[in-house]
Structures are given as structure tokens and as C-alpha cells.
Image: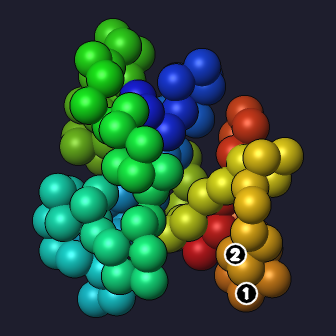
Amino acid sequence: INAESNGEPLKGKIAVGNVILNRVASPDFPNSIYGVIFDKTGGTQFTPVANGTIYNTPSADSILASKLCLDGASVAGSSLFFLNPVTATSSWIVKSRAYVTTIGNHAFYA
């Protein structure tokens, strides 16, 4: 959550956590949080895994967002994907997935 949404509001951090947990619940992805985060099916799924920022110390808000997600907080519906449309280098998600919402700098897709 921290590596993908540092600088985003708490709601944006929760939304990123929702994507992880939605993937865990989906038969199309690994069935553990670790498995989803480090999944390399079709390439590395999350940029922070590739660039190493996944290992940075999380902020207090990111820890709070993680706990809230695990307690059932949901702000991103059935989203399985997200991207920052300003910095994304690929648009396949936008072209092939249903738009759900935008929170902060991220757009979320099911």
C-alpha cells in the first residue's frame, strides 16, 4: 500500500489495499496477499516490486489503511486493477477493463 500510494489520501491507500484483497479473492490471481503482491504472471504486477520500493518503511497512514482493509473497509468496489493515468506507460487496462472510480491520482478498474 505504501509503495503504490505514498502521497495519496487515506481513501486512496485503502483503495489500493482493496485491489490486493480483491485479487486474493479472485480465482484469476494467487490466493494470498504475498502471492498477489509478488505475482509475475504476465510480467511484474506492481512497479514497487520491480524497483525495490516495496521494502521501504511504510507510513503510519499506510499501516492504518492496511488494518482498515483487513477489517473490511472498502472504497474501490470490485476493482482488480489501478493505474495513474498521467504516468502509466500502458493503456491496456483502460481499453479492456470496466472503470470503477478515481481516487486521488489513481483510476480503478474491475
Quadrant occupied by the C terminus: bottom right
> Residue at image x 74%, y 37%?
105
86 vs 3, left or right, is right
Q: Which residue in the structure is indicated by mark 2?
A: 93
- Spatial CA span between label 2 and label 1: 5 Å
Q: Residue 38 at what x, y percent from top left?
A: 26, 61
x then y, percent, for residue 43: 44, 75
The residue at the point 23 percent across, 40 percent down is 71
Q: Which residue is mark 1?
A: 96
Q: Residues within 10 Å of mark 1 (few under 14, many from 20)?
A: few
From the viewer's perspective, is residue 43 above or below residue 48?
A: below
Q: Is residue 17 visible?
A: no
Looking at the image, which residue is at 65% across and 68% down? 109
Element type at mark 1: helix
Q: Secondary structure at mark 2?
A: helix
Q: Are marks 2 and 1 in contact (CB under 8 Å)?
A: yes
Q: Which mark is residue 64?
A: none
